[in-house]
Structures are given as C-alpha cells and as structure tokens.
Image (cartoon, rainbow, N blue to C red):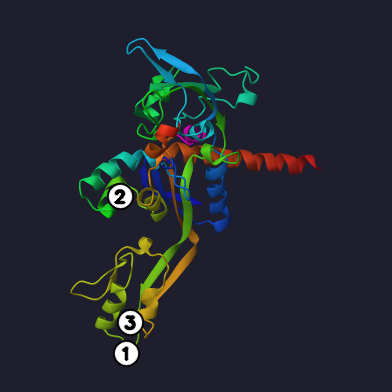
Amino acid sequence: MEIQIQELSPKKALLKFSDTTATEVNAIRRSLVSNIPKMAIDDVEFHLGTVHDDESGRDYDLSTSIFDEAIALRMGLLPVPTKPKSFRFKDKCTCKGEGCEHCQVIYTLDKKGPCTVYSRDLVPLGDPELAIADPDVPIVTLGARQAILTYATAVMGTGRQHAKWQVVHAVGFTAQPKVTINKAAGCSDACLKKAGSICPTKVFKAGDGPLEVVKEDACILCKDCEKACSHGSIKIDSDPTTYLFTFETDGSMTAREALRLAFENLVAEIDDLRDAVVSLG
Amino acid sequence: MMVPVRCFTCGKVVAQFWDAYQQRLARGEKAKDILDDLGVDRYCCRRMLMTHVDLVNDLGPYG
C-alpha cells in the first residue's frame, strides 16, 4: 500500500491510497471513526437555587429556559482539544478511576443573564490550552435574572461509545475514476464538447482544441458524459486498486494526528487478533 | 430552541457559524455566499443553518 497526501490542512485531509483493496481502506476508515481516543464532556454538575451578585445587589435564579440535560448534551458535543498520549482512560489511570489531571479535565461555567452563553465561557481548570476548540458555539441563552453555574468534567472515550468521542466526520473513500476519451467513428468534436459540458464537477476542459480531461480525480462516476455521447467515445471506469480517501476532524486534534492514531490502533487490533488466534493453539 | 451544536448527518460542529450567518443574512447577503465563505460545504451541514428557527428567546420568560 502506498499513501500519497494530496491535501492536508489542520482539519481536513485528502489522501490517495494505491496498490490496495477496498477492504484495507475500509479498515482504516473504521479505525478513524470508532477507535481514536479523545476527550469530551461526560459529566455536568448543575448548581441550583439562587445566587446573589454583590456588584448589582441582585438575586439570580439558577435556572434557564432549556432543560439541564439538554445543556449537558450540548456541552458534550463541544470539541475538547486532545493532545495524543497526554491523557489516559479513566478506568486505566493510576488514580484507579477517582479522577486526576491525567484522565480528566474540569471546566467551570459561571454566567449571569441577560446574555448568550458561549463555549468560550467554559473555563478549564489548569492548562488554558484546553479551552474548547471552537469558541463561538452558543450553549444557552439566559434571560434577565437567570444565571448558570456548572462544573463539567471531560473524560477520554472513543467513537464506539458515543458520537461525541468521534474525532473525524465526513470520512469516506471512492475508487480512483478513470476517464478516457477515444473518438469513435462518426463522433465529432462538437459532440464531445457537448458531452463534456454536461459534467457536474467539470472534469473536462473544452477550449479551442479537442476535449481534454483536466480533473480526473473530481469525477463522481455519474456517467452522464458517457450517456451524452451516443457514439461511445467517452468511457468512465474506476480503478479498484486505488482509492481517494477524505476525512475532516472536529478540531479536537489535527487530521495528521488523527490518522496516525488510527494507524496505531489498527496495528494494535491486528496484533491482538494474532495473539488471540495463536493462543487458541 | 437553540441551533444544534453539530450537523445531524455528518457531525461537523456547525453552531459556531450561527451568529455570523445571522448577522450576514441581516445585512442582505445571500445564504449561498455566506455558507460558501464560512466553509460549510456539504448540504447536510448547510440545511442545519438554513432551516433552523431560533425559538430560545421566545421561551426565555418561562424558564
């Protein structure tokens, strides 16, 4: 298997896997979706009752127009920055599940209305780099004399447990498209140009000369161009040994880190399987 | 209620674009141009913002 990086930004990757099979590429996809560990808010403690603000001399009711569980769900979905290997799973930590700086992050949220509470208002205890990756996510709107005081705890998990621990989204792959133009008998340049202009992703370029293939990778295999030329001059095929693979991350880690962890995890799983088979005797 | 934090279909965090999207719509920009500019490319994420009705302020007094 060969991997060529075609596009790699902090949150997005486009890779080309060649000399491989769909099964192998799918194993990488599944590892990316469900096996990368990351932090997400899992436990939210809401304080109830009233709070007194000394500055304004007012009392605030610690309740909002959204149910507490709905607020907790919204917090859970926020992307918590996760440096690989900097945290451990709570049940495998040296603190034996009690909760320490190596297996959990605590955020405090203390706001008084009227205002909109954003993800940037969640303040991490300790390292300020652990502030939520997307600062502008609205969590709840507070009316006048409404307030919110919560402690939220983020722990490690994987996408297999819940989608909030899923690092990547929109992950998918497609077989490498092969677009060939071979002018058949009876076909004209005008016919080819007409067929090429139908393409929704603009794979072809029809300048003054004959029709050319300029963006083969952009082809979505719809075969509209093939149907448009009745002479059969355009052929759309796909290469089952080469795959275009794309995914995005939610911002909790970079695409490069996510891919590296996915590979590590896949190798570990295969090793586990081998050991299990060997132990059968 | 509030705008969903993530896209129901793909899981992209879309709520962070809500305020900017609303402000730019109010300025008279086209939804297509705003979403293209914000990097909301897929139609699953685009419908999250385009079809959301923010009712949380109407519920405020009953909290």
Name the front one of labels 1 and 2: 2
Task: Give the label on residue A186, or none.
Answer: 1
**Magenta residues (range):** A73-78
Task: Give the label on residue A183, or none.
Answer: 3
Q: Amino acid at mark 2?
A: Leu
Element at badge 3?
Answer: loop
Q: CA distance from mark 1 to mark 2?
A: 45 Å
For disc 2, the marked residue is B35
Chain for mark 2? B
Magenta-highlighted stretch: main secondary structure?
Answer: helix
Q: In this rendering, do the residues under marks 3 and 2 share a single chain?
A: no
Residue A47: x, y in percent? 51, 20
Residue that lies at the very extreme toward the front in this rendered image: B62
Residue A126: x, y in percent? 44, 16
Q: Amino acid at mark 3?
A: Lys
Q: CA distance from mark 1 to mark 3?
A: 8 Å
User: Is residue A74 one of those drawn in magenta?
Assistant: yes
- Name the residue nearer the viewer: A188 or A202: A202
User: Is residue A142 one of those drawn in magenta?
Assistant: no
Element at badge 1?
Answer: loop
Chain for mark 3? A
Name the front one of labels 3 and 2: 2
In the rendered image, which quarter is residue A193 located in? bottom left
Residue B18: x, y in percent? 34, 42
Tell me: residue B55, above or below residue A51. below
Local crowd size for mark 2, using a 10 Å CA cut-off: few (<14), some (14–19), many (≥20): many
Tell me: residue A121, above or below residue A17. above
Q: Amino acid at mark 1?
A: Gly
Tell me: residue A245, above or below residue A175. above
Q: In this rendering, do the residues under marks 1 and 2 share a single chain?
A: no
Element at badge 2?
Answer: helix
Q: CA distance from mark 3 to mark 2?
A: 41 Å
